Image: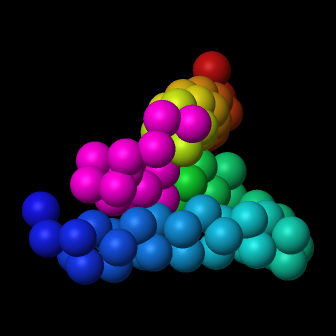
Amino acid sequence: MNPVLADVIGLAGSASIVGAYLYNNVAARVDALLYNMVNLVGAVLLCISLSVHFNLASLLLEFVWMGVAVFGIAKAVRMRSGA
């Protein structure tokens, strides 16, 4: 992958995660499914970027971030279905 494209993808991932964090802090009522989906997308984009600009610590952090987001998505879906 082109390193510049990897940077653009990584920046989009960072913007997604920061945007989700901002949303969590300014919204009167947070949609947990939306919040976690945006976090998941951000982490995936950062992992793609890290495949070009490898950093083990950052990659591990993004895998943990994805795991937390998937947990949050599952919890939000269960809450919406009333289970």
Taking the spot 55% from the left edge, 75% from the top edge, the residue there is: 15
Query: Which quadrant: the C terminus?
Result: top right
Q: Is residue 72 above or below residue 34?
A: above
Q: Is residue 61 above or below residue 27?
A: above
- The residue range painted magenta reads 41-57
Residue 20, quarter of the rendered image: bottom right
User: Residue 35 at x, y = what percent?
Assistant: 63, 57
User: Residue 28 at x, y = what percent?
Assistant: 87, 73
User: Residue 36 at x, y = what percent?
Assistant: 59, 49
Q: Is residue 43 above or below residue 80?
A: below
Given residues 7 and 16, the one toward you in this image is: 7
Q: What colour scheme governs how the chains and residues are painted in the rendered image of this protein?
A: rainbow
Residue at the far top: name it: 83
User: Residue 16 at x, y = what percent?
Assistant: 53, 69
Taking the spot 14% from the left edge, 71% from the top edge, the residue there is: 2
Query: Which quadrant: the N terminus?
Result: bottom left
Residue 34, quarter of the rendered image: bottom right
Q: Main secondary structure of the magenta part?
A: helix
Given residues 58 and 80, the one toward you in this image is: 58
Taking the spot 23% from the left edge, 70% from the top edge, the residue there is: 3
Residue 71, quarter of the rendered image: top right
Q: Is residue 28 visible?
A: yes
Q: Is residue 59 above or below residue 38?
A: above
Magenta span has 22? no
Q: Is residue 66 visible?
A: no
